[in-house]
Amino acid sequence: EIVLTQSPDNLSLSPGERATLSCRATRTINSAHLAWYQQKPGQAPRLLIYGASSRATGIPDRFSGSGYGTEFTLTISRLEPEDFAVYYCQQYGNSPRYSFGQGTKLEIK
Amino acid sequence: QMQLQQWGTGLLRPSETLSLTCAVHGGSFSGHYWSWIRQSPGKGLEWIGEVTESGSTNYNPSLKSRVAISVDTSKNEFSLKLNSVTAADRAMYYCARVGGWEFDFWGQGTLVTVSS
């Protein structure tokens, strides 16, 4: 089983700043199989990034994904007020077929 | 625009069977896997299982003995049954479409509580 560990657990930043969120896997992941989601209170997660670096439909270009192997990063170049939320990484693998990181809560400083 | 609408029983007693259904609107039902995912404060996001239009399934080994996911292509719906529920099954349950290797469309969620 591949375990995803996200860091930090909490991140406090101000609007306009750059956010860098990390996702580390216990084994190498095919980059095509790594995704990122944003979740706001009371809402379902929303797909942001798939294939480690491809933005989903309608996602602003201030969101970018990078990485390979066991280390992946979600970057938000300039934070907007609506970007403060919880972010999850997710991988496709074997047994279980899909798993998620524990999440990073991005808070307004 | 694809929409997933889900419904089902929100309050269960221990040992009962959880039953949820998800209807797919505005897009093709074929050619995709359709999943159930749950989210609880203690375990975060947990994938439960998935089904194709032909009824082929894959389940999370941790839940496999208690889970059944089925499909009704005539209604563009798929369903989840989880038997012998306990307090540990209390969570928000989501249905979702598998795009490639990720979940690109989600239902609104159903909160399931287990209490005697």
Image (tube, rainbow, N blue to C red):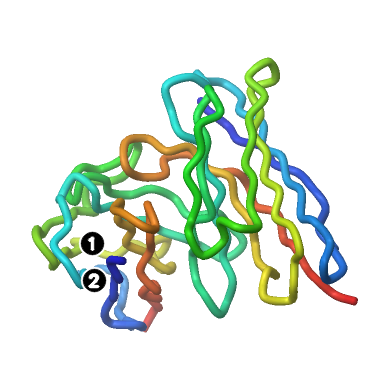
Residue B18, by quadrant, is bottom right
Q: Are marks 1 and 2 in contact (CB under 8 Å)?
A: yes
**Counting residues from the N terminus, which is met first, the one under dot 1 or under dot 2?**
2
Residue A22, by quadrant, is bottom left
- The kind of secondary structure element at disc 2 is strand
The number of discs equals: 2
Q: Residues within 10 Å of mark 2 (few under 14, many from 20)?
A: many
Q: Which dot marks residue A21?
A: 2
- The kind of secondary structure element at disc 1 is strand
Task: Judge whether B110 appears above or below A5 on screen.
Answer: above
- Write down the chain letter for disc 2: A
**In this rendering, position of residue A50 left or right of residue A10:** left
Question: Where residue A97 sits in the image (x, y, percent)?
Answer: 37, 52
- Write down the chain letter for disc 1: A
Amino acid type at circle 2 is Leu
Looking at the image, which residue is at 50% across and 32% down? B56
Q: Nearer the viewer, residue A63 or A67?
A: A67
Q: Which dot marks residue B37?
A: none
Question: Where residue B41 sits in the image (x, y, percent)?
Answer: 57, 77
Q: As drawn, which residue projects farthest toward the right?
A: B116
**In this rendering, position of residue A80 left or right of residue A19:** right
Looking at the image, which residue is at 66% across and 67% down? B91
Amino acid type at circle 1 is Ile
Question: Where residue B62 sits in the image (x, y, percent)?
Answer: 51, 65
Location of mark 1 (residue): A76
Q: Nearer the viewer, residue B9 or B80?
A: B80
Looking at the image, which residue is at 56% across and 21% down? B26
Q: Residues within 10 Å of mark 1 (few under 14, many from 20)?
A: many
